[in-house]
């Protein structure tokens, strides 16, 4: 598999794909790397990912998608919007609060506490946690539970690669994540708007899904603080609040972890919180969404358009009951 | 001074109030033209017009207690001016949501009004203000007589609906809607208190 990489520094803010690379796409095709070339995003062309593309199909409701099924080629939301319109209550509850207040977050050095059902629990510097795991670029749709959405080019490592290296035990059925708790750095935590620290979790098979990403950057650069620096989760088929930011702890455990929004309002936010146009939030219809930058609302797709890849994780489950 | 069209403010004070109260709208218009309304301009327009609806509605309700407490009868006409301004922002707010935000998604509009409690509350508030705006003229005041006063008590219900609309909208941080609700509670209390005292005094 031909893997080409462009130095991140050469990329413009708004364009993760290097234009010269795009213009040379025929070379890739001639080299036989059809998927990688059409994707315009080098570095993601792993064998099983390409294989997964085979059954992704093009059902009428499917959004436009690059052949490997991992990145979309829909227009990307401008970085200026992605970095100024945030739900990150640790820095305030207004959308523009995080961009204003997140400067107080110190992201270097950063370590992550590895806990629970793993071979070697302990605190690990972020660099060591990610070392040796190949970085990928993925353009994902992000669908907020508030019925708006964005298209964001992320940089990160597949969560499953990180988890695999932690050697989970057979009792590891769930992964629990925790955000930093430090009201000095996160002024929003001085008010008990939520039960701090922010907590999220995934079932282990969800966490091991190839789409689940631990992101360290976006738009070819490090994550801005307001977007969850230095390490955040990205689970594109779930509502945005599942994609926990500024992670300081990863715990593998046997029981379903408590999650912040579910604790705050259990009838409104389920543990799974898969994007589902058929199950409305009590306060919002989930049938449509406003793509930031667009004028009108577009129809929301089941699993945020990733049904082909992830629906089998929930085979036989009542998604209305397990919302 | 009885000249000019009927809707025109009757005093320079009222004209000044209208001018000041339209500043947020002017700011929104300029920001929209300059493209500085942020990542979600429609939401910004909705939020800002909604906030000003509530502020102006609370200001409307503050006039009578203030007039009584300060003994300033000249304040009375400002109640109507403020009320009409609140209704104007409310109409813009609803229009922004129904015509721009939900453009083409009319099924969502009906569903929202019927099934989302916060939208039901907000829409109810608008429906309550509508007859008050229509009957705000002197002609209607004369035509309705005592019933006008009774009808215009709907403004209390509209303000409660507006606060519920805000309270039920927010996800976790109730601070701002609670501030509005607290002020409304004080203003309603200021009206109820004399009534209760009178009731207690005459057994």
Image: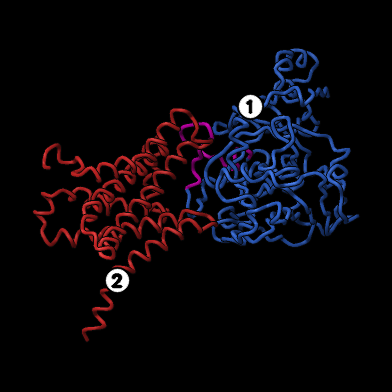
Q: Which residue extends farthest bottom?
A: B203
- Residue at position x 79%, y 24% from top? A7
Gap between marks 1 and 2 measured at Cα:
61 Å
User: Is B153 situated left or right of B43 in this image?
Assistant: left
**Chain B shade:** red
**Residue A303 image point, x, y percent:** 61, 43
Figure coloring: by chain
**Residue A21 image point, x, y percent:** 74, 17
- For mark 1, what is the residue? A73
Q: Chain of mark 1?
A: A
In the rendered image, which quarter contains the N terminus of chain A?
A: top right
In the rendered image, which quarter contains the C terminus of chain A?
A: bottom right
Q: Which chain is blue?
A: A
Identify the secondary structure beneath mark 2: helix
- For mark 2, what is the residue? B192
Identify the secondary structure beneath mark 1: loop
> Nearest the camera: B138 or A51?
B138
- Tell me if mark 2 has few (under 14), some (14-19) or many (20+) residues whose alpha carbon lies within 10 angstroms of its own: few
Provide the residue span drawn in magenta. A285-306
**Residue B54 image point, x, y percent:** 37, 52
Q: Is residue A305 magenta?
A: yes
Q: Chain of mark 2?
A: B
**Residue A16 image point, x, y percent:** 69, 26
> Disc 1 or disc 2, which is closer to the eye?
2
Q: Is residue A26 magenta?
A: no
Query: Residue A299 — which label?
Result: none
Looking at the rendering, which quadrant does residue A131 occupy?
Answer: top right
User: Is B18 situated left or right of B41 in this image?
Assistant: left
> Nearest the camera: A107 or A302?
A107
């Amino acid at each position: 598999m031909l893997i080409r990489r462009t130095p991140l520094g050469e990329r413009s803010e708004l364009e993760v794909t290097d234009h010269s690379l795009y213009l040379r796409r025929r070379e890739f095709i001639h080299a036989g790397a059809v998927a990688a070339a059409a994707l315009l995003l080098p570095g993601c062309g792993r064998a099983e990912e390409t294989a997964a593309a085979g059954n992704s199909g093009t059902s009428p409701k499917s959004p436009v998608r690059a052949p490997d099924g991992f990145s979309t080629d829909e227009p990307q939301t401008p970085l200026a919007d992605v970095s100024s319109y945030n739900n990150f209550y640790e820095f305030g509850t207004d959308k523009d609060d995080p961009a204003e207040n997140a400067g107080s977050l110190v992201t270097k050095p950063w370590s992550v506490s590895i806990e629970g059902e793993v071979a070697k629990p302990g605190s690990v510097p972020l660099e060591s946690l990610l070392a040796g795991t190949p970085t990928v670029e993925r353009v994902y749709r992000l669908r907020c539970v508030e019925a708006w959405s964005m298209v964001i080019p992320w940089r990160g490592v597949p969560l499953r690669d990180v988890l695999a290296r932690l050697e989970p035990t057979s009792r590891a059925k769930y992964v629990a994540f925790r955000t930093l708790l430090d009201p000095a750095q996160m002024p929003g935590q001085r008010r008990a708007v939520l039960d701090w620290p922010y907590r999220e979790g995934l079932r282990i098979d969800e966490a091991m899904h190839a789409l689940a990403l631990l992101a360290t950057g976006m738009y070819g650069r490090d994550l801005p603080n307001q977007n969850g620096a230095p390490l955040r989760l990205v689970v594109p088929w779930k509502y945005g609040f599942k994609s926990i930011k500024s992670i300081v702890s990863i715990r593998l455990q046997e029981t379903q972890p408590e999650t912040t929004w579910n604790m705050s309002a259990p009838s409104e936010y389920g543990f799974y919180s898969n994007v589902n146009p058929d199950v409305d939030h009590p306060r919002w219809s989930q049938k449509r969404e406003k793509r930031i930058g667009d004028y009108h609302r577009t129809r929301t797709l089941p699993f945020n358009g990733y049904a082909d890849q992830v629906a089998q994780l929930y085979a036989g489950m009542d998604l209305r009951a397990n919302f | 001074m009885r000249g000019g069209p009927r809707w025109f403010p009757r005093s320079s004070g009222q004209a000044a109030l209208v001018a000041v109260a339209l500043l947020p709208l002017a700011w929104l218009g300029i920001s929209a033209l300059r493209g500085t309304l942020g990542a979600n301009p429609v939401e910004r327009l909705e939020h800002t017009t909604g906030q000003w609806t509530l502020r102006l509605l609370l200001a409307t309700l503050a006039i009578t207690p203030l007039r009584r407490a300060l003994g300033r009868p000249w304040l009375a006409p400002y109640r109507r001016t403020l009320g009409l301004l609140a209704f104007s922002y409310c109409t813009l707010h609803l229009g922004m949501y129904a015509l721009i935000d939900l453009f083409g998604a009319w099924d969502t509009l009906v569903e929202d009004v019927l099934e989302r409690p916060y939208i039901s509350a907000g829409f109810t508030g608008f429906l309550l203000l509508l007859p008050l705006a229509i009957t705000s003229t002197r002609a209607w005041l004369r035509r309705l007589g005592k019933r006008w006063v009774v009808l215009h008590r709907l403004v209390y219900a509209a303000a409660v609906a507006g606060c519920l609309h805000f309270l039920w909208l927010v996800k976790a941080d109730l601070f701002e809607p609670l501030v509005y609700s607290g002020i409304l509670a004080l203003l309603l209390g200021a009206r109820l208190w004399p009534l209760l005292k009178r009731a207690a005094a005459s057994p």
